[in-house]
Image (cartoon, grey):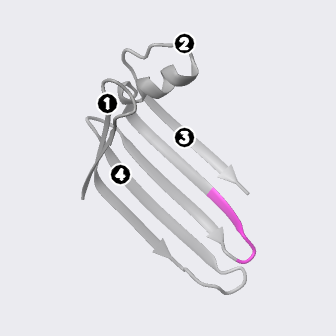
Amino acid sequence: VYVRFEDYTHAPPTVLEATNIAARVTGLSNERNAPVRVVSSVDALPSGAVSVEVDATLIPVKAAARVRVRDGDVRPMAPYVRDYAPLDVLSGFVSLDLEARF
């Protein structure tokens, strides 16, 4: 699967592309405390990869999520940074690991 997103609210337009999009949901149930797991991943073009893992229950609602970004090119995000800060993004890559619980 290939996805192309074009945002024409900036000049030049922001183009984000992704391929190798995958998602899997297991254990989906409306039973109380039934564990649900979501695993997804995507490769960003020209470089970078994002993966998301979520372990949750629907009743009651609670979740633990992990997001990993590897070698993501920050240049496509430059127009959005400029909207909020007087900062020009010229080059760079980002890798990060995030965890959240609620």
x and y percentages locating residue 85 in the rendered image: 57, 18
- For disc 4, the neighbor class at 10 Å (few under 14, some 14 to 19, many from 20) is some
N-terminal of the pair, mark 2 or mark 3, is 2
* Mark 2: secondary structure: loop
Look at the image and say whether residue 63 sits in the magenta stretch. Answer: yes
Which residue is labeled 1 in the image?
A: 13
Mark 2 to mark 3: distance in Å?
Answer: 26 Å
Residue type at tag 2: Pro
39 w.r.t. 50: above or below: below
Residue 86: which numbered mark, if any? Answer: 2
Residue type at tag 4: Val
Which residue is labeled 3 in the image?
A: 97
Mark 1 to mark 4: distance in Å?
Answer: 22 Å
- For disc 3, the neighbor class at 10 Å (few under 14, some 14 to 19, many from 20) is few
Which residue is rendered at x = 36% and y = 24% of the image? Answer: 75
Mark 1 to mark 3: distance in Å?
Answer: 29 Å
Mark 1 or 3: in front is 1
Mark 3 or 4: in front is 4
